[in-house]
């Protein structure tokens, strides 16, 4: 009996040691570092290096569906939700661009928003959400019918996405005691925060605005990727609700100090010459795509996870700045939105399409017949088009 008990005790101890080693190994996981302090190789990348094909979606142009500028786009399998913050319009289209309905409108009545800040759409049932002034999240059905309003209790949300019946949100400005401690949270369908995550780092309390959490805030492989603006680490929030550091950006001596961001205008100060900051990023299975502000110039930088090469595109000052589209000879591409794990997207405004038409010698130089037709018919009253690339 004693011998059997001793054997069982020994097995338990062994199992505990094994589990402890696993936890220790996970805690000691090496976080990859991307060195922005080195000189980057200028490389004239081609779109075929990253993608197999290109397609275009014309957003239907009607009086009701007209867009001045696109602030954000959300995709599901069969819907496209477009937000124009300037015109305060939230529009719903089919996946091929046919206009369906305007979601709510600016106002103070039921289902109306005083001023919309950001939008979202559920991947599960196409429910639509609009976050507005007054700290409220308005919910609409797939057909655009107003359902209810959820109080967000002074959270000042900058970005959010939905997972099942919950919202994952990022704080815009730390205007309250809650926001001062936390930058990311999970909120239930009743507006209650069920999980909150501390800022990874703290800044000088005399400059609270430098704690802004700014990110493209996107889902990839059932995880949410984000990073806290001004800092050096990209994080991933897993569906187990654990924050994991994914990448470290090493700026070296080129980092812009946090105090510089009390007023974004100081980036034009001569003292900032040679400094840089990453302003946006998107990740695919193999690459990280960065928009970098350096020497008061916007630069497009690509990191290859396999070769660990950090390259930047040749500088251009015109609308054609992006990855050269050698697939169908159409417009240059730079990813801004994630449709799903294998499709990235960007938008092209009608005025830029007209510039492209005027710049080209003949429409026949564009191999995509659909895009040729778009160029022939575009006017300043046309809507934007969505350019999608299907990644390798």
Image (cartoon, rainbow, N blue to C red):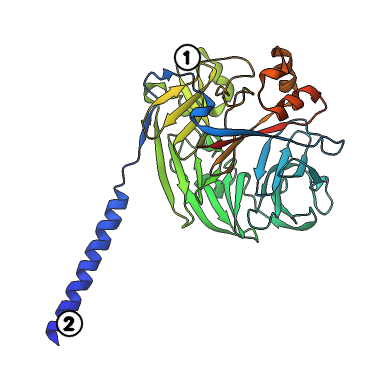
Q: Position of residue 198 (x, y in %)?
A: 47, 48
> Is 68 or 370 nearer to us in this picture?
370
Q: Position of residue 246 (x, y in %)?
A: 41, 42
Q: Is residue 263 left or right of residue 294?
A: right
Tag 1's secondary structure?
loop
Quadrant for the N terminus, please: bottom left
Q: Position of residue 377 (x, y in %)?
A: 81, 25
Q: Residues within 10 Å of mark 2 (few under 14, many from 20)?
A: few
Q: Quadrant of residue 235?
A: top left
Tag 2's secondary structure?
helix
Q: Is residue 284 left or right of residue 305?
A: right
Q: Which mark is residue 362?
A: none
| Mark in the foreground, 2 or 1 | 2
Q: Position of residue 112 (x, y in %)?
A: 81, 49
Sequence-first disc among 2 and 1:
2
Q: Which mark is residue 5?
A: 2
Placement of 245 over or under 330, stated as above or below: below
Q: Quadrant of residue 218?
A: top right
At a point 60% along the width and 49% down the height, the residue shown is 161
Residue beneath disc 1: 273
Q: Residues within 10 Å of mark 1 (few under 14, many from 20)?
A: some
Query: For the residues marked 2 and 1, what is the alpha-carbon distance in whole angstroms?
Result: 71 Å
> Is 150 or 93 nearer to us in this picture?
93
């Amino acid at each position: 009996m004693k011998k059997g008990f001793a054997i069982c005790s020994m097995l338990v101890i062994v199992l505990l040691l094994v589990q402890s080693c696993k936890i220790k190994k996970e805690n000691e996981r090496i976080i990859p570092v991307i060195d922005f302090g080195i000189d980057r190789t200028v490389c004239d990348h081609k779109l075929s290096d990253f993608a197999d094909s290109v397609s275009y979606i014309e957003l239907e142009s009607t009086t009701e569906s007209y867009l001045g500028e696109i602030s954000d786009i959300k995709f599901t399998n069969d819907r496209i939700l477009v937000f124009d913050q300037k015109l305060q319009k939230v529009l719903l289209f089919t996946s091929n661009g046919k206009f369906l309905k305007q979601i709510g409108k600016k106002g103070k009545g039921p289902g109306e928003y005083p001023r919309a800040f950001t939008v979202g759409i559920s991947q599960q049932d196409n429910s639509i959400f609009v976050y507005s002034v007054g700290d409220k999240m308005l919910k609409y059905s797939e057909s655009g019918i107003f359902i209810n309003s959820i109080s967000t209790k002074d959270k000042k949300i900058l970005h959010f996405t939905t997972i099942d019946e919950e919202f994952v949100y990022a704080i815009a400005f730390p205007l309250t005691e809650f926001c001062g401690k936390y930058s990311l949270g999970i909120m239930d369908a009743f507006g209650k925060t069920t999980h909150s995550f501390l800022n990874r780092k703290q800044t000088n309390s005399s400059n609270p605005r430098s704690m802004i959490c700014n990110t493209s805030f996107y889902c990839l492989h059932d995880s949410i990727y984000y990073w806290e603006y001004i800092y050096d680490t990209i994080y991933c929030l897993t569906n187990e609700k654990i924050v994991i550091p994914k990448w470290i950006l090493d700026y070296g001596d080129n980092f812009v100090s946090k105090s510089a961001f009390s007023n974004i205008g100081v980036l034009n100060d001569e003292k900032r010459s040679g400094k840089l900051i990453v302003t946006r990023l998107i990740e695919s299975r193999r690459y990280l795509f960065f928009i970098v502000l350096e020497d008061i110039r916007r630069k497009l930088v690509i990191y290859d996870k396999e070769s660990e090469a950090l390259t930047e595109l040749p500088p251009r000052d015109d609308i054609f700045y992006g990855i050269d589209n050698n697939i169908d000879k159409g417009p240059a591409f730079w990813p801004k939105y994630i449709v799903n794990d294998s499709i990235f997207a960007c938008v092209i405004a009608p005025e830029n399409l007209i510039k492209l038409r005027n710049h080209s010698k003949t429409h026949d130089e564009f191999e995509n017949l659909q895009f040729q037709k778009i160029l022939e018919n575009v006017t300043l009253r046309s809507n934007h088009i969505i350019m999608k690339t299907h990644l390798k």
